[in-house]
Amino acid sequence: MISSSAHPDSRRGKAPSTDFLNCPTGFVEYYFSDGIFRWSDGLYRMYGYERGEVVPSMEMVLPHIEPEDRPRVQAYWDHVSTQGGPLSIYLSIRDRKDHQHKLLYSADYIMDGNTPIGVWGVVVDLTTSIHTDRHQLATEAVAASAVNRAIIEQAKGILMGRTGVTADHAYQLINQLSQDTNRKVYAIAQDIVDRATIGAGDPDAQAHPLL
């Protein structure tokens, strides 16, 4: 819930400071008295427009929203405009060039004393953040996979050198022990490598079952 005088810059078309967010942000105000949506420049840009190119309204926005999200958005607006908030919703839109954006809306009443006179909201475009996180996770997964494969190949080499088995048989032995002990193949391979390394410098070290 926000006072009608809390964000003077917003009524001049400027969004309040959101420097703490590393995502594009926008701002919207709607006053019951005139029924007009007032958008910040950042919100126009999320939809692919510049100020003056379109008149913000629910009718203008709904075609940009992914069809599966439209009923939720309409219900969200009906709730926040009649009951206030704070209330948030996550949705997907298509901008003017048909690029998808993942947006987080958070809204509440604008208050004049104890009387609600409109709705105020902040919009955060999470698209870049989500893509960055996914890329980071994928990169980390590829790196981890490469490390795991290197350890497995090293363990296979140790078994081949010490028991004379083939590469395929060495992997079968590791895989079988993995199943018997309910541990991951990588964990068994790491164990073989660790114990072989310890054993090389300590003749009294306990031998691995496969060695």
Image (tube, rainbow, N blue to C red):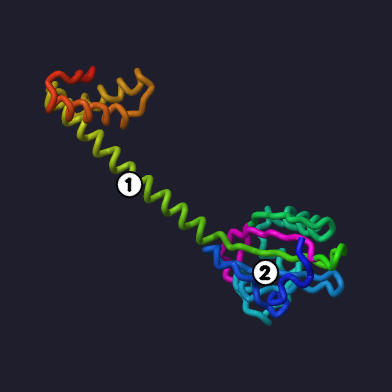
Residue 134 falls left or right of residue 210: right
Q: Residue 18 location in percent, x, y?
A: 59, 67
Name the dominant secondary structure of the magenta segment: strand
List the residue tagged with mark 2.
27
Tell me if I can see residue 203 in this picture: yes
Q: Would residue 82 be counted in the magenta stretch?
A: no
- Relative vertical location of residue 154 with respect to residue 59 in this rendering, above or below: above
Which percent across, then down, holds residue 16?
64, 71
Q: Which of the 4 image quadrants contains residue 159?
A: top left
What stretch of residues is rendered in magenta? 92-110
Q: Which residue is mark 1?
A: 143
Where does residue 94 sit, x and y in percent of width and height? 61, 64
Three-letter residue code for mark 1: Ala
**Tag 2, which secondary structure?**
strand
Q: Which residue sits at x=41%, y=53%?
A: 136
Position of residue 198 in the picture relative to residue 70 (left or right)? left
Mark 2 residue type: Phe
Circle 2 residues within 10 Å: few <14, some 14–19, many ≥20: many
Question: Is the C terminus in the top left, top right, bottom left or bottom right quadrant?
Answer: top left
